[in-house]
Image (cartoon, grey):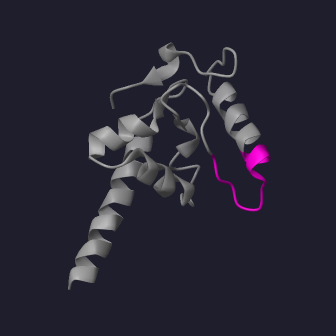
Amino acid sequence: MALESAMYMRSEQYSSVYSMLRKIPKGKVTTYGTIAKKLALNPRFVGRILSKNEHQKIYPCYKVVQSDGTIGGYTLRNTTSKRSLAIKKKKLVSDGVRFVRGKIPKEFILYRL
């Protein structure tokens, strides 16, 4: 019974994180910390959930960055991490997000969802 309850809670956490991704408009990003704070989760746990996203076209996890505006991580199956990060940056730029000295300016970051 306790295991079923824990699995249900985890499933709810995943669903909550993924639903937050759909609230991020084109040309904007948010942070792991913003999502974590809204859902009372650890930012690293949010990152772990996003790394397991199998539906990236529906749930755009590439729109989540680190709180200092750096790009953070990005996981794509069968791709090196360096290549994955290049793809994440390309997707962000194509959405209209700019980079200044390797960071995303605050004007593109949503701190409330």
> Height in image: 50 above or below 78?
above
Is 9 left, or right, of 43 in this rendering?
A: left
Q: Position of residue 20 (x, y in %)?
A: 38, 43
Of residues 18 and 102, which is closer to you in this image?
102
Taking the view exactly as shown, the residue that stands out farthest to the left is 1
| Residue 100 seen anywhere in this rendered image of the structure | yes
Quadrant for the C terminus in the image: top left
Residue 91 magenta-drawn?
no
> Height in image: 55 above or below 33?
below
Q: Position of residue 60 (x, y in %)?
A: 54, 44
Q: Position of residue 32 (x, y in %)?
A: 45, 40
Total numbered labels: 0
* Rendered image quadrant of residue 111: top left
* Rendered image quadrant of residue 79: bottom right
The magenta region covers 74-84
> Height in image: 96 above or below 76?
above
Quadrant for the N terminus in the image: bottom left
Residue at image coords 42%, 25%: 110
Is 106 left, or right, of 20 in this rendering?
A: right
Of residues 54 and 79, which is closer to you in this image?
79
Residue at image coords 49%, 16%: 106
